[in-house]
Image (cartoon, coloured by chain):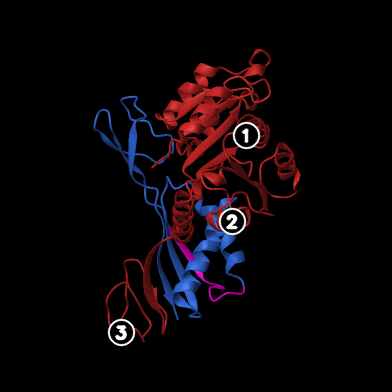
Amino acid sequence: MCATCGCSDDAAVHSHADDHSHAEGSHTVVLEQDVLAKNDHLAGHNRSRLRDLGVFAVNLMSSPGAGKTTLLEQTVHALGASVPLAVVEGDQETLLDADRIKASGAPVVQINTGAGCHLDATMLSRALDTLAPARGSVLFVENVGNLVCPALFDLGEAARVVIMSVTEGPGKPLKYPHMFASTDLVLLNKVDLLPYVSFSVPEFLHDLRHVNPDARVVEISATRGDGLDEWYGWLRRRPDRG
Amino acid sequence: MHEMSITQSVVDAIVSRLGDAEVRSVRLEIGRLSGVVPDSVRFCFDVVCAGTSLQGAELEIDEPPGRAACRDCGAEFGIDDPILLCACGSANVEVLAGRQLRIKSVEVV
């Protein structure tokens, strides 16, 4: 039987004026399946696995060069002695960022995506097998530097953080609305450079509210230290998106 | 370009459900607020299908419009742009439709 129109004549060549036709011997199978169902299913597994271990997993996303790795180095130096931390590094190639994190003293696993522009739930699952984060730790997942693709893929994280630097210029929340709409926290980085660049913090906040009325914003300088205590406070509170 | 992995997920899901059955066409639904570009999926489709039971299959894509409701003024409105602003000026908006990314059906031989 044709699953689309219900006609019983599936052996004959026939067509329908509305929206479909059959060649001889073919039939339609209705799937009604979410394209990302497999990823979301695996992300659910990652989420329960992390929750069972009491691990707070943070998906860190930004453009390349916004300061993710520098922020992580500072965070490991500041909190590493009191909170167990672990890092998953996502880049297309090289171990450069993983080497920096390792030097700062946190356990790290590097995932190279090759041509891929984002991490997915399978990649995080494999990284967890290798990294085995300690019970009660904070796990940072440094996603591939890209404001487009990572927004679409649930990894099983408890919270999402977007880092945006003032040197990137205005308009980013409106230009990349999917990324800014999906985040719990925005870290506005490199505020020490505000006197030297054309960037209006009030305009940025105004644009951000158009795509995400709820995200918390912290202004930071990962190199000079501004705002980092507030970032550490947020991490210690572990505000799980639920 | 995340459309390459999206398209790979489509092909993997179909092969996983239908095994070796020869697929003649695939119908997808890509909502206008989904963040996925239909033309990019079309571009990737032939490449990803090569050497699989979907090789040579046609791709049909429906693009259902977005719909949203304002939590402040209660208005419901159509929207095809991911910047979710109600006419009243509020961005406190719930998306009702347009984010779907689904494999609707396939035609198999």
- Most extreme residue toward the bottom, as rendered? A11
Q: Residue at x 32, y 69 (%)?
A: A17
The chain assigned the colour red in the figure is A
Q: Is residue A174 visible?
A: no
Tell me, for residue B103, which label it has, or none. none
Which subunit holds the residue at mark 1? A
Q: Is residue B103 visible?
A: yes
Span highlighted in magenta in the image: B51-61
Question: In the rendered structure, are the residues bearing label 1 and label 3 in contact, judged by CB atoms less than 8 Å apart?
Answer: no
Disc 1 residue type? Ala
B55 on left or right of B14: right
Which one is nearer the viewer's eye here, A72 or A24?
A72
Q: Label 3 belongs to which residue?
A: A9
Q: Label 2 belongs to which residue?
A: A123
Q: Of marks 3 and 2, which one's residue comes earlier in the chain?
A: 3
Label 3 to label 2: alpha-carbon separation: 46 Å
Q: Label 1 belongs to which residue?
A: A81
User: Where in the figure is residue A179, as x and y percent of width and height?
Assistant: 51, 39
Label 1 and label 3 in one chain: yes
Label 1 to label 3: alpha-carbon separation: 72 Å
Label 2 to label 1: alpha-carbon separation: 28 Å
The quarter of the displayed image where residue A181 is located: top left
Judged by its main secondary structure, the magenta piece is loop
Is residue B48 located in the magenta-colored stretch of the structure? no
| Helix, strand or loop for disc 3 | loop
How many residues crowd around disc 2 within 10 Å: few (fewer than 14), some, or many (20 or more)? some
Which subunit holds the residue at mark 2? A
Disc 1 versus disc 3: nearer the observer: 1
Colour representing chain B: blue
